[in-house]
């Protein structure tokens, strides 16, 4: 009975699988384009085309807004720039191993090094690599490399950087490596063959050496599949290279006891299954109808010829009695679960961040580890080119992949930082995530820190909910890693910061200095303003140019104000502040607007026994003396005026020094002066007649008054004069 052994690494590699999954996800939201076939497999490309993936050959076919995928082989820098210039929405599916080569050759060119690429000149991957550096040289094998070195003797002493197409064979690289080391003095060689490719080739070589027939599945234009077929054909004459089950010749397999099967990186699992099913139906069932159709079993390891074995395998050769899987484990595994590693971000997708570890492993971190708090966007959290430290959580040596965890590494580092912060008494920052019994929880670098209510910095009985989602600064007061308990204090930080700010204020304070402060409390006589660690008082008289009775008429607790220092006492720790600004002084506006003799429309605001106060403009009042209210004698101002009345009055005097104004209504109704003769006759008559007496109105009486803070006026008490003296 024939036995079929399927290579464990057969089928999609990590990079190809990743690009196909990205295409399938993108197609869920509508059609898109691929610059060249996404992978080298016509069946897969045709299937994706039916779903809406259009293959284009040039950026000129792109229209603004088109969604375009860069295939796993990558593209040159010029092509990528052309896509962006065309307005394409780019989804980069370049294999992470290829992206690493792009970075290596770009850095080499920037440093003036000659780049040599070992690969197939016309292959899209090689073309993309060449488009990331300056004047590269492409050689297909050791013979082509030797020819170039012979014709460019001067290059042998110049700096050279060698990279390899990811799907090349290890043997080809080693042959080229021998020449480089022999002839070149300043060369650096990077083994950039894909890890999965290396394993796939080594598996194929061992299978082909041990089996009577080999079946290689893959696209005829796939470099890695062609190399597999070549390697197998060198060791097994009965080797078939097929793209699908229709091309399989089962006739040459019927008499073969053991058949090996492998598949290139672009061969999907469903094609592999179809080939297996055909072999099962036409070979094994004919031999034994009741037998299981396919056996996936390890093959006994067979020693390779020394000249063909890869150096890495040679150096760690395992005993012949070991199984194939054991040999792979011993020879190829270079990183382990739990290892701490560091790498560079080379690609970002909606689901994972690809990391270049500088090895053949394709490493990745789930994007969820960068966006766990829900408020952080992926594009803000990580960028291509960033260096990331992580812990290895899962290694797949067959695929050559490694899953990393940044979160676990951060947790290790963050606990150490928290302990160091407690020991040094340093301040840390965090975000309040929740309120719980007795306080709040603050997230500091992903670690929960409990802050008791007494250490929250809030006044007693203040709801803790106002702190939730707020960023805070705190001191770590207790750390117990075993119990995963951390306690902190916001209050301690606030107190220290306030002391430092207060000290700075006292060191720099001077009369006239302006501060931006916050109103902390109000009293009947003024407002207390925090100017940075210390409170100053703004007296009610300094809050407004207008007459106010309560500070609440002007400011409220929490208001931000620009205040200036009027006076201070360092010993008593007292500061007097002013708020009203000189440029807002209504008196300045008044003197710039009016002069003596002008008529103004005024509003009566207060009645007194000796007259009425009237508002000339907001913040500026004048006095209408009782003698100036009417052109007749009145006993009280309220006989003529009421509070709120708006009347015309003449400005009769302005005392700029005392900022006092005299007004007269009477002046607007008095007749023109009598001729001189009439005045003389009247004077003679009054000398002979008895005179009635009325209150004396000195010439300057309208200016002689003071108004207290409560609004009460004080001034001269009127005496009595004759009517005739009017």
Image (cartoon, rainbow, N blue to C red):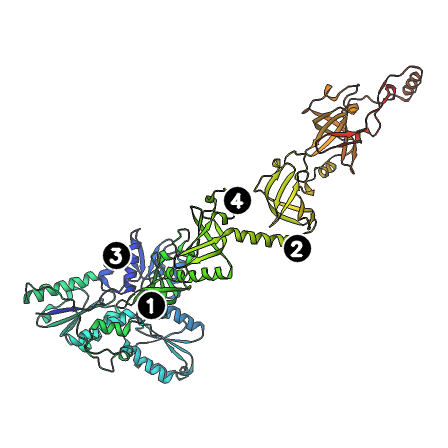
Residue 562 or 427: which is nearer the viewer? 427
Q: How crowded is mark 3: few (under 14 residues within 10 Å), some or many (20 or more)?
A: some
358 to the left or right of 398: right
Q: Which percent across, then down, holds residue 31?
A: 30, 53
**Label 3 to label 2: alpha-carbon separation:** 75 Å
Dividing the image into 4 quarters, which one contains the C terminus?
top right
**Label 4 to label 1: alpha-carbon separation:** 58 Å
Q: Give the SS element for disc 2.
A: helix
The residue shown at (87%, 19%) is 724
Q: Do the residues labelled 4 and 1 touch (CB within 8 Å)?
A: no
Mark 1 or 3: in front is 1
Occupied quadrant, residue 303: bottom left
The residue shown at (60%, 50%) is 533
Q: Which percent across, then down, holds residue 291?
A: 8, 64
Q: Which of marks 2 and 1 is nearer the N terminus?
A: 1
Q: Which of marks 1 and 3 is nearer the N terminus?
A: 3
Read off the residue under disc 2.
507
Q: Tell me, for residue 97, which label it has, or none.
A: 1
- On the question of residue 642 being in view, the answer is yes
Q: Residues within 10 Å of mark 1 (few under 14, many from 20)?
A: many
Mark 4 or 2: in front is 4
- On the question of residue 651 being in view, the answer is no
Q: In this view, does 170 lie above or below 411?
A: below
Q: Give the SS element for disc 3.
A: helix
Read off the residue under disc 4.
459
Q: Do the residues labelled 2 and 1 touch (CB within 8 Å)?
A: no
């Amino acid at each position: 009975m024939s036995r079929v052994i399927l290579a464990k690494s057969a089928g999609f590699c990590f990079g190809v699988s990743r690009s196909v999954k990205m295409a399938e996800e993108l197609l869920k939201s509508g059609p898109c384009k691929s610059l060249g076939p996404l992978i080298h497999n016509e069946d897969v490309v045709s299937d994706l085309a039916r779903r809406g993936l259009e293959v284009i050959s040039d950026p000129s076919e792109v229209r603004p807004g088109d969604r375009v995928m860069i295939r796993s082989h990558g593209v040159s820098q010029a092509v990528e720039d052309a896509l962006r210039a065309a307005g394409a929405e780019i989804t980069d599916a370049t294999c992470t191993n290829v992206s690493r080569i792009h970075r290596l050759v770009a850095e080499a060119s920037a440093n003036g090094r000659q780049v040599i690429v070992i690969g197939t000149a016309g292959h899209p991957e090689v073309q993309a690599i060449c488009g990331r550096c300056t004047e590269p040289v492409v050689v297909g094998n050791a013979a082509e490399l030797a020819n170039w070195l012979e014709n460019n003797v001067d290059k042998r002493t110049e700096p050279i950087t060698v990279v390899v197409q990811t799907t090349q064979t290890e043997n080809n690289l080693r042959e080229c490596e021998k020449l480089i080391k022999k002839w070149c003095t300043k060369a650096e060689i990077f083994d950039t063959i894909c890890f999965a490719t290396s394993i796939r080739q080594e598996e194929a070589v061992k299978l082909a050496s041990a089996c009577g027939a080999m079946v290689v599945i893959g696209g005829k234009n796939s470099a890695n599949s062609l190399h597999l077929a070549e390697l197998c054909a060198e060791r097994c004459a009965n080797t078939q290279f097929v793209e699908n089950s229709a091309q399989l010749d089962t006739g040459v397999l019927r008499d073969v006891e053991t058949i090996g099967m492998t598949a290139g990186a672009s061969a999907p699992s469903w094609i592999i299954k179809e080939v297996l099913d055909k072999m099962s139906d036409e070979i094994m069932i004919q031999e034994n109808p009741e037998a299981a159709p396919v056996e996936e079993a390890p093959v006994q390891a067979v020693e390779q010829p020394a000249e063909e074995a890869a150096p890495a395998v040679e150096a760690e050769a395992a005993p012949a009695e070991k199984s194939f899987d054991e040999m792979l484990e011993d020879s190829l595994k270079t990183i382990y679960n739990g290892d701490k590693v560091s790498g560079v971000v080379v690609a970002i997708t909606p689901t994972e961040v690809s990391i270049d570890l500088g090895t053949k492993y394709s490493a990745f971190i789930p994007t969820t580890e960068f966006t766990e708090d829900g408020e952080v966007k992926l594009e803000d959290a990580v960028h291509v080119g960033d260096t990331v430290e992580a812990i290895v959580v899962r290694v797949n040596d067959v695929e050559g992949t490694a899953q990393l965890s940044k979160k676990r590494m951060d947790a290790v580092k963050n606990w150490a930082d928290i302990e160091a912060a407690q020991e040094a008494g340093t301040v840390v920052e965090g975000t309040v995530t929740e309120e719980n019994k007795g306080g709040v929880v603050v997230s500091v670098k992903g670690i929960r820190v409990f802050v008791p209510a007494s250490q929250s910095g809030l006044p007693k009985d203040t709801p803790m909910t106002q702190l939730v989602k707020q960023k805070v600064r705190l001191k770590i007061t207790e750390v117990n890693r075993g119990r995963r308990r951390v306690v902190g204090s916001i209050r301690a930080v606030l107190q220290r910061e306030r002391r430092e700010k207060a000290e700075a204020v006292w060191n720099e304070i001077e009369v006239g200095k302006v501060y931006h402060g916050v109103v902390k409390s109000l009293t009947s006589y003024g407002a207390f303003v925090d100017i940075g660690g210390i409170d100053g008082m703004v007296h009610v008289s300094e809050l407004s140019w207008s007459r106010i009775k309560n500070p609440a008429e002007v400011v409220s607790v929490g208001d931000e104000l620009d205040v200036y220092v009027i006076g201070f006492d360092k010993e008593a720790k007292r500061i007097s502040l002013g708020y009203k600004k000189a440029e807002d002084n209504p008196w300045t506006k008044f003197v710039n607007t009016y002069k003596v003799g002008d008529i103004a429309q005024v509003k009566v605001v207060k009645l007194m026994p000796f007259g009425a106060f009237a508002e000339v403009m907001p913040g500026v009042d004048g006095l209408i003396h009782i003698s100036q209210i009417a052109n007749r004698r009145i006993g009280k101002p309220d006989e003529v005026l009421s509070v709120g009345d708006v009347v015309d009055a003449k400005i009769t005097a302005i005392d700029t020094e005392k900022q006092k104004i005299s007004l007269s209504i009477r002046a607007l109704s008095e007749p023109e002066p009598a001729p001189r003769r009439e005045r003389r006759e009247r004077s003679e008559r009054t000398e002979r007649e008895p005179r009635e007496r009325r209150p004396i109105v000195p010439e300057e009486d309208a200016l002689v008054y003071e108004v207290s803070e409560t609004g009460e006026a004080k001034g001269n008490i009127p005496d009595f004069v004759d009517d005739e003296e009017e």
